[in-house]
Image (cartoon, rainbow, N blue to C red):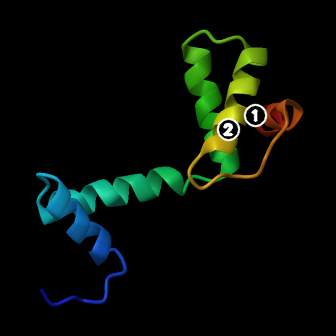
Amino acid sequence: MPTDGNPLDPLLDHLQRSSTLHRSEAERVVMEVMAWFSEDASAFVRRRHRELQRRGTPNAEAYAQIAAELAARPVAGPSLSVRQVRRVIYG
């Protein structure tokens, strides 16, 4: 199969071989995942805080959860303390 030099081709080939996804579906999934993880730390903190607020999570618990989630992301953002998380949200 000729390649157009797309650095994602090996990943897309793997997804096609290992799943029922067609090439266009694999491309869409990969682009969605890349967009999801390209979110910078500040945007992630603000988004997660809004989501946790909607669920009724108390702020102190939300700050700790956000800090832990940020550190555990596949491409981890900077390590933020609870205080730094609060500053991103309200700063």
Q: Quadrant of the N terminus?
A: bottom left
Residue 55 % position (x, y) = 55, 13
Q: Are marks 1 and 2 in contact (CB under 8 Å)?
A: yes
Q: Which residue is mark 1?
A: 89
Disc tally is: 2
Which residue lies at the image location 23% right of the left edge and 60% below the top edge?
A: 15
Q: Which one is nearer the viewer's eye here, 72 or 66? A: 72
At x 29% / y 75%, what residue is drawn?
Answer: 10
Residue found at the very far front of the displayed protein: 18
User: Residue at point 36% right, 53% down?
Assistant: 32
| Residue at mark 1 to residue at mark 2: CA–CA distance | 7 Å
Q: Is residue 3 left or right of residue 57?
A: left
Estimate how packed mark 2 is, as few (under 14), some (14 to 19) or many (20 or more) residues with alpha carbons within 10 Å: many
Task: Point out residue 58 in the picture as x, y percentages from the top left corner.
Answer: 71, 11
Picture coordinates of residue 34 (x, y %)?
44, 59
Single out the mark in the foreground, 1 or 2: 2
As helix, strand or loop, the secondary structure at mark 1 comes to helix
Amino acid type, callout 2: Val
* Amino acid type, label 1: Ile
Q: Is residue 7 left or right of residue 21?
A: right
> Position of 10 compared to 67: left or right?
left
Q: Nearer the viewer, residue 75 or 28?
A: 75
